[in-house]
Image (cartoon, rainbow, N blue to C red):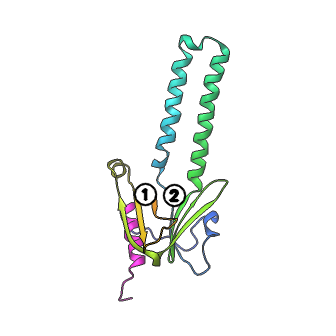
Amino acid sequence: MRLVAPPNRAPASVNRYLLPYEQDVVTIRRHPAVLIGPVAAVLGALIFAGILSNTVVASSAAVLAVIWWVWLLILVWFVWRVAEWSVDYFVITSQRLLLTQGLITRQVNMMPLGKVTDMRFERTLLGRFLGYGTFVMESAGQDQALSRINFVPYPEQLYLEVVGLIFKDPNE
């Protein structure tokens, strides 16, 4: 399965960082598993707030209000994390790799394909079960802004796509 995208498939929030001569090869969001921690925090806080609400500790209305306001803050934090995930993209172009992050403060990390000297992907047991991996890239003796990308969906296919761009077919 190839994940090659038609030209200009990237959303406008990513398209503004592409050079005129670059071709968008793959544009994806990070795997939704990046939200496992926030989901667990919201559900755990909900259960904890529910238990505290039914105990002797929460006998007054003020204590109940504080418990549920704290849970509401955790819920707002969760919604913020989901919104951040929805605008974060990993982009593979014909010239470079980009990782755009951030809802308010935008951060764009980039590595030219020509600088990648070594690339591997890692998959934990949970990553194999859920379908995500981590890309680790190295360049010749330099510390790059884009050296590790966590929660990459379809890591095998994307790995082959990137390696195919780095090591072009000599017959073409």
Residue that appears at 57% across and 67% down: 10
Q: Position of residue 20 (x, y in %)?
A: 62, 79
Q: Is residue 41 left or right of residue 59?
A: left
Residue 57 in magenta stretch: no
| Marks 2/1: CA–CA distance | 8 Å
Residue designated by label 2: 29
Badge 2: residue crowd in 10 Å (few <14, some 14–19, many ≥20): some
Residue 161 in magenta stretch: yes
Q: Quadrant of the N terminus?
A: bottom left
Q: Can the viewer see residue 1?
A: no
Q: Circle 2 sits in a helix, a strand or a loop, which is it?
A: loop
Residue that appears at 48% across and 36% down: 40
For the residue marked with disc 1, what is the amino acid? Pro
Residue that appears at 49% across and 56% down: 30
Badge 1: residue crowd in 10 Å (few <14, some 14–19, many ≥20): many
- Residue extending furthest toward the left: 125
Which label belongs to residue 153? 1
Depth check: 112 or 140 in front?
140
CB-based contact (under 8 Å), mark 2 and mark 1: yes
Q: Position of residue 41 (x, y in %)?
A: 51, 35
Depth check: 1 or 137 in front?
137
Q: Is residue 103 left or right of residue 95?
A: right
Q: Can the viewer see residue 49?
A: yes
Which label belongs to residue 68? none
Q: Quadrant of the C terminus?
A: bottom left
Q: What stretch of residues is rendered in magenta? A: 152-172
Q: Position of residue 146 (x, y in %)?
A: 50, 65
Residue that appears at 60% across and 11% down: 59
Q: Note whether 172 is above or below 39 in the view shown.
A: below
